[in-house]
Amino acid sequence: MKKKFSFYAHNWTRLFVLFIAFFVIDGHFYVKYYPQVKEFLMNIPIPVLNCYSVPSTTFACPIGTFQHFLVIGYFSFVTVGMLLLVGGLVGRWTCGWLCPFGFVQELIHLIPTRKFEIPHWMRYIKYIVLIVFVVIMPLFVTSKDTGMTETWFCKLVCPAGTLGAGIPHVLMDDGLHDLIGIMYWWKIAFLLIVLVAALFTRRPFCTTICPLGGFLGLFNKISFLKLRFIEDRCYNCNLCVRDCPMGLDPRKDFDSPECIRCMNCVQKKCFAIRKYTSISTEIPHEN
Amino acid sequence: MKIKGQTVKPILLFLSFIIGFFFILIGIGMEEFLEISGNALTL
């Protein structure tokens, strides 16, 4: 009998999609030849953490854009509207299938080392980061150098910006060498901490710090795309727990704000975790 | 009055779509996209 094709058949499928998304979002192959495409797409914030200072990026970063508008005294309706629409549609799905920095962390995690779980309380740090660094500080905290408020999350925290923009810009432009200060080395150190942590634990930045993941995760319980656990089908093989890139137990946490909708648990042979949408005709029964 | 979660969730989903849609329309009306690209290009 011919086996039915499943898009979620293997974790490698998702890594391949992440790989393609990485090249589309960072535009290495077409930005050079089609600058008009970049000019158009640069207006659009997309729901992944991609720094718009990356030399070859094609889209705007929603966290950077939101902060920038707060700094100049406005509210970014487009960014928040886009996040509400995407969050309502698929929750945190974009973290699992599109985010370039998540992809980098997952690749590093593939290196065989002893693995650890992140303490549960650390998952709440990202909400503090969201409120303090993305909302309050860009509104009220002024920089000593400029006397103005700044995009503080980008300046102090964002390792995606350091990896994609900070390091390449310094390597490409000798004139920037004189400007390197303690802030640059702090961000390099923080990036290294995140990348080393990714060796030993699953998606450490997404789990504990990412404010975008924190915001989109709030929609997981209500989103159009849903997961459901069917207890009768589960025979406790624990494969879904083993393969969860966020270190969750999908049997309990199928609609947790931490779930990135990677669908690794959905494709297990027991079919205990089912995906469905708000308009599905056959909704798996609840427990 | 107690409202069950299964009633509240679709309402919240509907609200997020409606608010998101109108926010994008407002943003387009305020020509936010020009500011976004301007910011991105000057960084």
Image: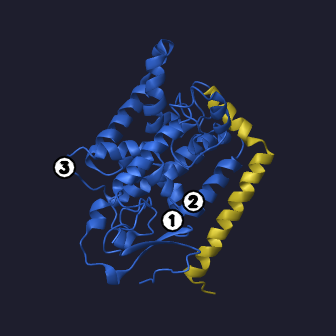
Chain colours: A blue, B yellow
Label 3 residue SS: loop
Q: Are marks 3 and 1 in contact (CB under 8 Å)?
A: no
Crowd tier of the residue under label 1, counting other residues whose Cα lies within 10 Å: few below 14, some 14–19, many 20 or above: many
- Residue A135 in percent (x, y) is at 59, 47
Q: Are marks 1 and 2 in contact (CB under 8 Å)?
A: no
Q: Which residue is mark 2?
A: A87
Q: Which residue is mark 1?
A: A220
Q: CA distance from mark 1 to mark 2?
A: 8 Å
- Residue A56 in percent (x, y) is at 53, 30
Q: Nearer the viewer, residue A72 or A247?
A: A247
Chain hosting mark 2:
A
> Which image quadrant for residue A120?
bottom left
| Quadrant location, the N terminus of chain A | bottom left
Q: Is residue A102 visible?
A: no
Q: Is residue A189 above or below residue B25?
A: above
Q: In the image, is A53 to the left or to the right of A236?
A: right
Q: Answer yes or no: are tags 3 and 1 on the same subunit.
A: yes
Q: Is residue B18 above or below residue B38?
A: below
**Amino acid marked by disc 2:** Gly
